[in-house]
Amino acid sequence: MTSYLIKGARPYGGDAVDLLLKDGRIAAIGESLAATGAEVVDAAGLIALPGLVDLHTHLREPGREDAETVETGSRAAALGGFTAVHAMANTDPVADTAGVVEQVWRLGQEAGLVDVVPVGAVTVGLAGERLAELGAMADSAARVRVFSDDGHCVADPALMRRALEYVKALDGVVAQHAEEPRLTVGAQMHEGDRSARLGLTGWPAAAEEAIIARDVLLAGHVGARLHICHVSTAGSVDILRWAKARGVQVTAEVTPHHLLLTDECAESYDPVFKVNPPLRTDADVEAVRRGLADGTIDAVATDHAPHPVEDKECEWAQARPGMLGLEQALPVVVQTMVETGLLDWRGVADRMSARPAAIGRLDGHGRPLEPGEPANLLLLDPGVRSTVDPAALASRSRNSPYAGRELPGRVVATFLRGIPTVLDGKAQR
Ligand SMILES: NC(=O)N[C@@H](CC(=O)O)C(=O)O
Ligand SMILES: [Zn+2]
Ligand SMILES: [Zn+2]
């Protein structure tokens, strides 16, 4: 097995050191380490961070391989600096049995670019009626710990309570797509002055906040872990802060797009900006940034949602919701959280690696850059700014909301258990 000597990298943006990667682990960190047969990687000026962990990725396989596959999504993830991604369950067939989650897990191992960790559906077929085989998925080779009907809300409160009781026994977590469906019938964008003026049906903030309020009460009552997907409103952050202060075991994520973009994007009527939950107001963006900075929101998760051209290059109302995120997640966080002074590099590592790994109960990911730890890490050039070209992305789909935008920071290399999945900005397989 080849070993690698990374020369002159700056762990967490600190002083330059060498890192020796051997047998899948960080063998040594120090000044002027001897190469002794290791392949040398010049990392002068580059920041080293633990490999990123995504709690929320849509890889579309099985069923929509025209939009993405486990392999193409894994490549996009590695290029974004990720070493593990959670693959959402809203595939076709739905990942609601041990058989499907094991298939996705195996495809991830075969691609070999990131650890693909399947999410199991909460209900059979995401239909919201009967619980899926949560225990069988947890006991399978895929070792599922995160359960979600994402794309749909587990709207029935009695079923949600039952799901929380089951996952508690499995040391799992329910990741809720918080959307009260009766309040979002036909919804197209954030409900406010703009939706009224544009003549698009609104998705009120209260549809998200009502479910979060309900579910933190249920999680507190049951004593189970609850995770809130893609938090998008200031009111949601307030409710989470209240619930955490009361000791409820709730965690939450925010997407890169909700940290950067607002409902102003809908003025273009370009469906690339159509997403669930919708892009919100400036005040909401400010609130989710502050919530991420103070830890009320635990993690950044991409909600990478590839869609083929025919589902996105059409009329707004006909378009499917969702946008790409894996390859630009770190640059967006650098722009919105680091360049604004809201997070330092250790904070980025915490919100994009350590905490998501802990929520997903992943061994071997989210660990600090220290000798003896698994060699899952990335090297970032913080000084480079580049303009996003959707045609150059590794994803099979092109629906990036950042097309034509200049963003800071470029992932130069990613290592998975000591082996480069990305070098010189290029995927290694
Ligand atoms: N975010 C989206 O707008 N779409 C997601 C589903 C989801 O995350 O709710 C998708 O699967 O396309
Ligand atoms: Zn969702
Ligand atoms: Zn999603």
Image (spheres, rainbow, N blue to C red):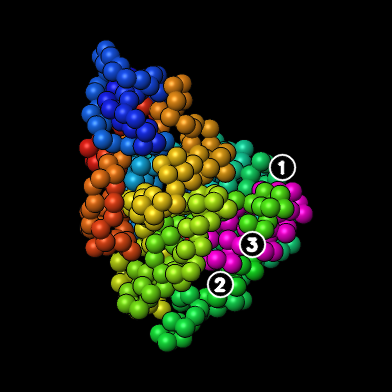
Q: Residue at x 23, y 47 (%)?
A: 384
Q: Residue at x 33, y 37 (%)?
A: 47
Q: Is residue 221 above or below residue 317?
A: above
Helix, strand or loop for the magenta stretch, by majority: helix
Does 353 sit left or right of 392 as displayed?
right
| The magenta stretch spans residue 143 | no
Provide the secondary structure element on which disc 3 rests.
helix
Q: Is residue 132 visible?
A: no
Query: If the image is split into quadrants, where does the N terminus sit?
Result: top left
- Disc 2 residue type? Ala
Provide the secondary structure element on which disc 2 rests.
helix
Residue 27: name its quadrant.
Answer: top left
Residue that carries the numbered disc 3 in the rendered image: 239
Q: Residue 261 versus residue 363: which sits nearer the camera?
A: 261
Q: Marks 3 and 1: which is nearer the front?
A: 3
N-terminal of the pair, mark 3 or mark 1, is 1
- Disc 3 residue type? Ile
Q: Residue 86 versus residue 41: which sits nearer the camera?
A: 41
Give me the C-alpha separation between circle 3 and circle 1: 26 Å
Q: Is residue 262 above or below residue 20?
A: below
Residue that carries the numbered disc 1 in the rendered image: 169
**x, y percent for residue 394:** 28, 50
- Tell me whether circle 3 and circle 1 mark residues in contact (CB < 8 Å): no
Residue that carries the numbered disc 2 in the rendered image: 205
Does 140 sit left or right of 27 as displayed?
right
**x, y percent for residue 404:** 24, 63
Q: Is residue 392 visible?
A: yes
